[in-house]
Amino acid sequence: MSEKTLKVTLVKSKYGRGKRHIACVHGLGLRKMHHTVVVEDTPAVRGMINRISFMLRVEEN
């Protein structure tokens, strides 16, 4: 059984953003610019990605 995953990269700075945007960045496990993480494709993760989509680059695995 294979799990769907997403490769998420932070391409814009989190500084100068609202508290909710910064919380989404941290919730996804991103630490600094150009940091990439692989996360499971769940509705909660999709919601965080949708909120800060302008700051991210997302690739499906």
Image: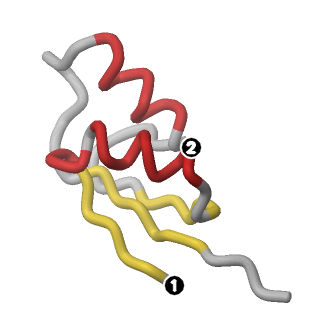
In x, y percent, where is residue 49?
37, 48
Give the label on residue 28, or none: none
In x, y percent, where is residue 30?
45, 43
Residue at far front of view: 43
Q: Is residue 10 left or right of residue 41?
A: left
Q: Quadrant of the N terminus?
A: bottom right
Tag 2 residue: 44
Mark 1 → mark 2, Cα distance in angstroms: 18 Å
Secondary structure, mark 2, is helix
Q: Is residue 51 left or right of residue 45?
A: left
Q: Three-letter amino acid code at disc 2? A: Ala
In x, y percent, where is residue 34?
29, 56
Badge 2 local density, few (<14 within 10 Å), some, or many (20+)? few
Q: Three-letter amino acid code at disc 1? A: Asn
In x, y percent, where is residue 37?
51, 59
Residue at far right of view: 1
Q: Mark 1 touching mark 2, by CB under 8 A?
A: no
Rendered residue at 64%/62% (across/down): 40
Tag 1 residue: 61
Which label lies toward us, 1 or 2?
Answer: 2
Rendered residue at 43%/43% (across/down): 47
Viewer-proximal residue among 2 and 55: 2
State which quadrant residue 36 falls in.
Answer: bottom left
Badge 1 local density, few (<14 within 10 Å), some, or many (20+)? few
Q: Is residue 1 left or right of residue 50?
A: right
Rendered residue at 41%/61% (across/down): 8
Rendered residue at 56%/43% (across/down): 44
Color scheme of the displayed model: secondary structure
Residue at far top of view: 19
As displayed, is residue 44 above or below residue 11? above
Secondary structure, mark 1, is loop
